[in-house]
Image: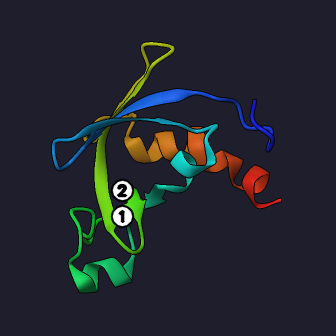
Amino acid sequence: MNKYGVPYHEYVLHLADGNVTTVDVGIEEDWGDIQDCFDDMERDEGADICGSQEKDKVGLGNDVDGHVEIMKVEDTESDMVWEVGTASTPYEWAKERVWCYVDNYSS
């Protein structure tokens, strides 16, 4: 567990641009780059793959460089998978496994 009380837990992210990366929600720098894609500013700028009109998308990145949509998430410690187009989406993963720690990081 990190200093904020968030457990270290790695996930493999498959991005819309074809890249694959690993993040750990217990590492603050990784956690902060997992963001909601539904943002009017991004749509207007057209700066990234995540800037569509659809809700409930999650991306990896930041407001300056843009976000790339997360298409699939694999839990490195179990057989759990969250994938776009299924009942268990990356957005659900972000709500249940990442954003639930917002209060930990903001305190």
- The answer to whether one can see residue 16 in this image is yes
Q: The residue under label 2 is which amino acid type?
A: Lys
In terms of depth relative to the viewer, which is nearer, 72 or 17?
Answer: 17
For this view, does 89 lie left or right of residue 68? right
Can you give x and y, in whole percent of width and height, for residue 45 in the image? 25, 84
In the displayed image of the protein, which residue is found farthest to the left?
Answer: 18
Image vertical order of residue 18 relative to residue 56, above or below: above
Numbered disc in front, either 2 or 1 = 2
Image vertical order of residue 103 relative to residue 42, above or below: above
Residue at coordinates 26% horizontally, 72% vertically from top-left?
53
Q: The residue under label 1 is which amino acid type?
A: Lys
Q: Give the colour scheme shown.
A: rainbow
Could you give the CA–CA distance between mark 2 and mark 1, rounded to whole angstroms? 6 Å
Residue at coordinates 51% horizontally, 27% vertically from top-left?
10
Q: Which residue is mark 2?
A: 57
For this view, does 67 lie left or right of residue 34? left
Residue at coordinates 26% horizontally, 70% vertically from top-left?
51
Is the residue marked by circle 1 packed among few (<14), some (14-19), or many (20+) residues within 10 Å? few
Q: Secondary structure at mark 2?
A: loop
Looking at the figure, which quarter contains the N terminus? top right
Image vertical order of residue 84 relative to residue 107, above or below: above
- The answer to whether one can see residue 56 in this image is no
Question: Circles 2 and 1: CB distance less than 8 Å?
Answer: yes
